[in-house]
Every structure is written in C-alpha cells, then in structure tokens.
Image (cartoon, rainbow, N blue to C red):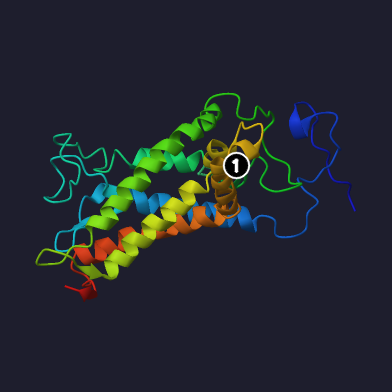
Amino acid sequence: SAAPTVAPKTGTGVFSKTRAALGARTLRTDRWWVPPLATVVGLAAFVVYATIRSYVRTAYWVSDYHYLTPFYSPCVSTDCVPGASHFGHWFGHIPAILPLGFLVLPFLLLFRLTCYYYRKAYYRSVWFSPPACAVAEPHAKYTGETKLPLIIQNAHRYFFYVAVLVALINTYDAIIAFHGKSGGFGFGLGNLVLAGNALLLWAYTLSCHSCRHIAGGRLKNFSAHPVRYWFWTQVSKLNTRHMTLAWTTLGTLVLTDFYVMLVASGTISDPRFIN
Ligand code: FES
C-alpha cells in the first residue's frame, strides 16, 4: 500500500523537525473522540439552556413558597418580580441585552471556565490542544497559559472567593424558601431541590484546587497547623471527586432552575409536606 504522506515539519510543537515523522494524525484505532465529543455536547447543552433561561425573565420566582432559581439570584433590579429581591434593589431598569441575574452569571461562568477540571475538558474537546493522548493537535504553536486570553486562567483563585459568595447566597435562598403558602414555616419538594443544590454547590466549591491550596498550601510543616491540616485533609478528599462534582452541579443547577420554572409557571404544583 502507498506510504502515508509525511506532515510538513516547519513549525513548533507536533510540527517540529524533532518529532517523529508520522503521516497520520494519530495511530490510535480506538474511539478516542468519544470523550471529547460527549464533553462538548454536555457543555453546549448547559450554555444554551442557561442563556435562554437567563434572558426570558419569566417563571424564576414562586411567590407562594419563596423559591428563587439560582440563575436569577441575587435579583437586585427594580425589574425583578416583587419578593424576589432578597438583598434589595441596587439598580433600576436593566436593559434586555443583559440577563437579570447579571451579577451572578458572569462569575458563575468565569469560575467554571477557569476551573482546573473544566480546562482539561475543554482544552481537549473545544481547543483540541490536544484532543486526546497521542492525537496531534492542529495548532502550530504552544504558548500554554502565558498569553492573552489564556493567561486569565490564573485568576481562578480570585473567582473562587466570588464562588463562595454565590454559594452563601444560594444557601440563604434555600433557607428562606422554607415558607408556607399562608406564611410561617413550610416544607415541600422544592425545598429538597433548593437545599440539595446548595449542598452540592458547596461540595463543588470546597473541592476546588484553589481552595485546597488556601487550606494547606505554603506551610512548612503541618504539625504546627493542626486546624489547617484537618481542613486540607477534608478538602483533599472532596478534591478527588472534583470532576464528578463539576458535572453533578452543572446538572443540579439546570434541574433546580427547571423545577422552579415548572412550579412558577403553574405547569406542576409543588408537593407539600407541611403547609
Ligand atoms: Fe475547579 Fe477551582 S479547580 S473550581
């Protein structure tokens, strides 16, 4: 059979003269493209859903039970439906070009986009750098995270603090949602959804690699810092599940919003256990 054509060796990286002269992009024969494809489908589904829901400005608040979807929290504009602004009105009218949850969505996305796990996922599936082990990437140059825009990845540690704030706000929302139709304490299926979402958000946020560094990094010896050592040990346990938590919370965010939307729009009624 004809010999495979040899890729031109003119640039750097996989195109450099010192790399093996392989004609094929990869010699792998397994379905190496399945994981990157699944990743891109999952991430795209989230982005499409979150974008549509963030812009529709309907069915985000259940006034009977005080359920607020995380995509609209905090709701700090006078455009927010009465009752949904737990922290007051900081802004007047927000033009339709911006989502009502404009204070949360950019940070939610920046935290996730710069997350160490998500980077691994989309560097492979979207950036193709490289798409899989032993599969050549199309880029001629490799500059890592040293230049714009990828140098912004280094700001992840700061987005972590904002993510803690978001988790606190979602926790507050979940607590005040224990509200009955006629006032006082109430408890329904929506409470389990909101509380479960907040709990998993904490697990994802605390399992962050930056959090692990804050807990136990730059210490010369653990024996002199027993509290930080204990915290670091707990965070390390969660950290081993960071990928699972990243996907789980992407799913629970969507499910929580979807549930609030169904109840708020009157499509289903919230099963109540108390009041
Ligand atoms: Fe994933 Fe920080 S590393 S959230």
Residue at the farthest front position: 224
Q: Nearer the viewer, residue 82 or 141?
A: 82
Q: Is 244 situated left or right of 20 in this image?
A: left
Residue 127 place in picture, x, y as percent: 59, 40
Q: Is 61 situated left or right of 202 in this image?
A: left
Residue 87 place in picture, x, y as percent: 20, 42
Q: Nearer the viewer, residue 264 or 162?
A: 162
Residue 24 place in picture, x, y as percent: 79, 46
Residue 187 place in picture, x, y as percent: 23, 69
Quarter of the image with the C terminus is: bottom left
Identity of the residue drawn at 75% across and 27% down: 12
Residue marked by disc 1? 123
Identity of the residue drawn at 56% across and 57% down: 38
- Observer able to see residue 264: yes
Identity of the residue drawn at 52% across and 48% down: 207
In the image, residue 207 above or below residue 217: below
Q: Is 55 situated left or right of 158 in this image?
A: left
Few, some or many residues within 10 Å of mark 1 (<14, 14–19, 20+): some
In the image, residue 260 above or below residue 167: below
Disc 1 marks which amino acid? Tyr
